[in-house]
Image (cartoon, rainbow, N blue to C red):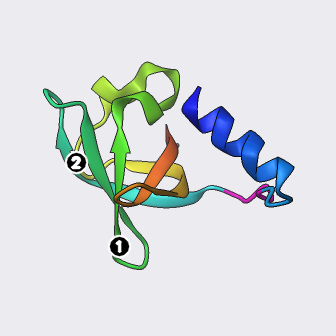
Amino acid sequence: MERQLKEHSRALQGEVKQDVKPDRGTVNSLFPKEGYGFIQTRDGRDIYFHRNSVLDGAFDRLSPGAEVRFSEEEGEKGPQASTVEMAG
């Protein structure tokens, strides 16, 4: 809901995001009990993601080294993945 409100606010201000092809990366670290992990991008950056960002309930099927597609956005504490999807 919060994300929808932010997107609506950006749209009203003329800051609409353009559709971008998802990036690819590799799950670098995973903290299943805490419900989050990090994706290493192709350029070596770490991107945070939360269990709720993983599509199709696939969080429990992820493991370090898994290739994923993701959409990046700026979060409160830095870059984060808004959606994560298992690749392949």
Circle 2 Cα neighbour tier, 10 Å, few/some/many (<14 / 14–19 / ≥20):
some
Marks 1/2: CA distance? 15 Å
SS state under label 2: loop
Q: Earlier in the sequence, mark 1 or mark 2?
A: 1
Q: Is residue 30 left or right of residue 55?
A: left
Which label number is shown at residue 79?
none
Mark identifier at residue 64: 2
Residue 87 seen in the current view: no
Task: Please tell me in which quadrant of the rendered image residue 40 appears.
Answer: bottom left
Can the viewer see residue 43 in this picture? yes
Is 42 displayed left or right of 18 in the figure?
A: left
Number of numbered discs visible in the structure rendering = 2
Can residue 19 be found in the magenta stretch? Answer: yes
The magenta segment: 17-21
Q: Residue at x 74, y 45 (%)?
A: 9
Task: Residue 23: give x, y in percent of width and height.
Answer: 56, 61
Residue under the point 85% across and 48% down: 12
Looking at the rendered structure, the secondary structure element under dot 1 is loop
- Residue at point 16% right, 31% down? 34
Q: Quadrant of residue 39?
A: bottom left
Q: Which amino acid type corresponds to the residue marked 2 in the rendered image? A: Pro
Q: Main SS type for the magenta part?
A: loop
Q: Which numbered disc, 1 or 2, marks the residue closer to the eye?
A: 1
The label shown at residue 45 is 1
Amino acid type at circle 1 is Arg
Quarter placement of the N terminus: top right
Q: Relative to 36, is 51 on the left or the right?
A: right
